[in-house]
Image (spheres, grey):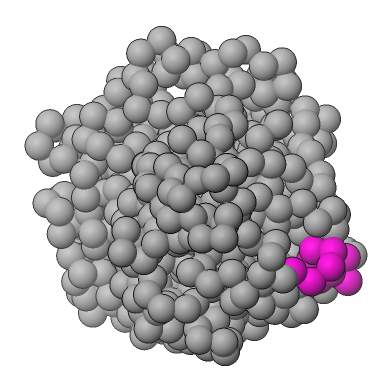
Amino acid sequence: MKTQNLSPSPWSDVAPRLVAVAAGRSPADLVIRGGQWVNVHTREVLPGHDIAIAEGRFAAIAPDLSYAIGPETEVIEAEGRFMVPGLCDGHMHVESGMLTPAEFAAAVIPHGTTSMFADPHEIANVLGIEGVRMMHDEALMQPVNMFMQMPSCAPSAPGLETTPYEIGPDEVAEAMTWPGIIGLGEMMNFPGVIAGSQQMLAEIAATQRAGKTVGGHYASPDLGPAFLAYVAGGPADDHEGTTEMDPVVRARQGMRAMMRHGSAWFDVDRQITAVTEKGLDPRNFILCTDDCHPGTLVEEGHMDRAYRRAVEKGCDPLVALQMATINTATHFGLERELGSIAPGRRADLILTSDLRTLPCEQVIARGRTVAQNGRLTVTCPHYDWPTAARDTVRMGRDKTAKDFEIPAPAGADTVRVRVIGIVENQAPTRALTAELTVRDGIVEPDAAQDVAQCAVIERHKGSGRMVNGFVNGFRYKGRMAMASTVAHDSHQIIVVGTDRALMAKAANAIARMGGGFSLWKDGEEIADIPLPVAGLMSDAPAAEMAARASNLVARMRDCGCDLNNASIQHSFLALVVIPELRISDLGLVDVTKFEFTELFA
């Protein structure tokens, strides 16, 4: 399918017009008058300035640009409001919002996000390079800047999980020629890089030969030789830090430290002190969201929310703005294209009356108003997703309660098992153990110890393969189960529950709906979220998806789970690249060693 590319004309094509407007020989398309210019290059607020825009780009900024106003020029009176560059998200996954790129853009534009750097590795694990191309093509159709990174790791951990498609150096090299690909997605196989994997280093080399940025993912507390080897392998940034020292050591090694504040990751809280207290140069720090639930996007915000969090934690607003604009643009080699209000750049800006809380009263992208007072004022075009992208759940036969039974060693009355321990508001898990009761030869979960059962079912090839385990931390009570096809990163079916019969019902329900979430309690389905595109996304409006997602979280509370955004914690149980303990369709994984481990301790 041929898609419409709405990207602005290159600077080289429109430079004569920009020069003419700045010189007063040609009227501007738009002039914003009488605002406070927030200059992220110099970290200043300059009152009493006008902005002239032509061909979707800034032509001039000065105290008086009345000479650029012609009969056809649109004029916006800033009335002393702050004129802030459009916000940039340095690392995120569109699929985590359960929305296609068009609907994701529609959700975040009213919150002032005008540039996104997205790694579509979720769909890459389901549909391979063709899935990435679909995401890329819909991204190019949007009225804001939605850049894609070519996923680096599908599967994320070869040998520890299975996916129907694999990404390698040839696919990476091909994608680097696409117009909307900005670099390589997060290099999650950090053990491979450290060990000198030819495939991982070849992907990095292909990206660097194309002059593009290599995304990092170092999810280990080891800051010794292993970390140094990873940095030497080429990743240019990292967002997996959770402590104050993590961004410090990354910046010292020449990486950009990305501090995330998403729906379930509140790492800004612990990391911003590297700037606010240690006084490190903020140019090497970037704000990002990583993963945002649709309810968060609609009800709380996106990059404006991350910015506000940094300010609440003591960061100077102008420094926080640099971390959410120019620092990100510079990192991806786009400082001359976006990230600031300066001549030649894409005309992306926010008009706001308060620099600390950042209400996005008017959002302009590429020189036209795209949102006003929280309401989208433009159309975000949709890609025509083919049947192949909507028919991705192949579980095989329906599951029964017996499929979720875990036989105990012969003669045992109790067993000690390894348990995945989730950590609220953080991506890492803990490797725990628990003593569980055996009844009729089957190991039972234990609500008193907060130990529920979990399982991963292969859903791409219909093999019927599945693995059972245990999880701690959801605080589920009574008879319940939840299943989803969102199971980072291989996106098999993941099921968590206290009742094996309901676990089977939940798995069968999402297989019938073609992917999504299904929550059951006391024999009935009490919430669902259909995700027909790759079992990951919906092209329904963001508000509808937010309502469904919020209902799911509320009904999870009815089952005893009051964790913040617990559905994201559910979907990350299979993320076999972040320590300490995870589960995949091949077994229980010790991510501190990147090897399988036994369920029985």
Q: Position of residue 2 (x, y in %)?
A: 88, 64
Q: At 77% from the left edge and 78% from the top edge, which residue is drawn?
A: 512
Horizontally, is 266 left or right of 376 in the view?
left
Residue 307 is at least partly visible in this image:
yes
User: Is residue 11 placed above or below 547 in the rendered structure?
Assistant: above
Question: Quadrant of the rendered structure where residue 586 is?
Answer: top right
Residue closest to the eye, 597 or 402: 402
Whether residue 401 sits left or right of residue 220 in the image: it is right
In this view of the protein, which residue sits in the foreground, 119 or 46?
A: 119
Considering only vertical position in the picture, is 444 above or below 428? below
Can see residue 565?
Answer: no
Does 579 sit left or right of 488 as displayed? left
Front position in the image: 279 or 465: 465
Horizontal relation, residue 278 to residue 34: left or right: left
Part of the protein shown in magenta: 387-399
Residue 575: percent from left, percent from top: 55, 46
